[in-house]
Image (cartoon, grey):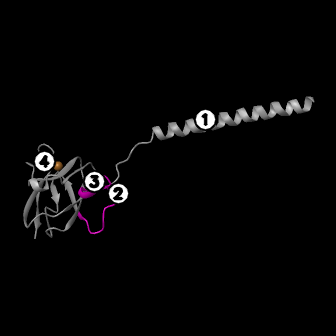
Amino acid sequence: MQKSAKNIIAIIVLIILLILLIYFVVDYNKKQSKTTIETSKPLFGNLNQITNPLEKIPEGAISIKISRTGFEPKEFTVDSKKVVNLALTGMDGTHSLVFKDKVLEKVKIYVGREETRGISFTAPKVGDYSFYCDIPGHKEAEEIGTMHVK
Ligand SMILES: [Cu+2]
């Protein structure tokens, strides 16, 4: 009789310990996830599917670097009515790539230092479209370029 009572107490203590253990593990995991620093992932936002951005830069994307010395390359050529995948990499701080023409007003890429972001859009009609960095003072410092559409 005494022995089985001891067994029951032992089982109850074990259950309590198990509940405490689970509680602390869950709590620890919650704290861990709260302190996770969000890193900026390369993002490829498709203008036609903006709610479902791709996280990988498609193969054959036009890669442009931007720094305080300007865009590199400063010019590129695309085909009219074809999809353009543009990837911008910031080299030394916050920069952007925006187009002057209203037709391309939705095509905007903002990047931080050592960050690559991109956008997909359909090339407009044949012509030359100038782009620039709209961070104050950057356009004036020759952060400008041209997209040729043929
Ligand atoms: Cu800039």
Residue holding disc 3: 50
**Residue behind label 2 places its C-beta within 8 angstroms of ligand 1:** no
**Residue behind label 3 places its C-beta within 8 angstroms of ligand 1:** no
Residue holding disc 1: 24
Q: Position of residue 55 (x, y in %)?
A: 35, 57
Magenta segment boundaries in residue numbering: 43-62
Tag 3 and tag 4, C-beta contact below 8 Å: no
Residue flagged by tag 1: what amino acid is it?
A: Phe
The label nearer to you, 3 versus 4, is: 3
Answer with left or right where residue 95 lies relative to residue 32.
Answer: left
Q: Residues within 10 Å of mark 3 (few under 14, many from 20)?
A: few
In the image, residue 55 lies in the stretch drawn in magenta:
yes
In the image, residue 125 lies in the stretch drawn in magenta:
no
Q: Nearer the viewer, residue 114 or 30?
A: 30
Answer with left or right where residue 4 lies relative to residue 108.
Answer: right
Work out whether mark 1 precedes mark 3 in sequence or the reverse, and give the earlier one. 1
Q: CA distance from mark 3 to mark 4?
A: 27 Å
Q: Position of residue 21 (x, y in %)?
A: 65, 36
Residue flagged by tag 3: what amino acid is it?
A: Ile
Tag 1 and tag 3, C-beta contact below 8 Å: no
At mark 4, the secondary structure is loop
Residue holding disc 4: 138
Answer with left or right where residue 117 lies relative to residue 146.
Answer: right
Work out whether mark 3 precedes mark 4 in sequence or the reverse, and give the earlier one. 3
The label nearer to you, 2 versus 3, is: 3
- Asked whether the viewer can see residue 100, the reply is no
Residue flagged by tag 4: what amino acid is it?
A: His
At mark 2, the secondary structure is loop
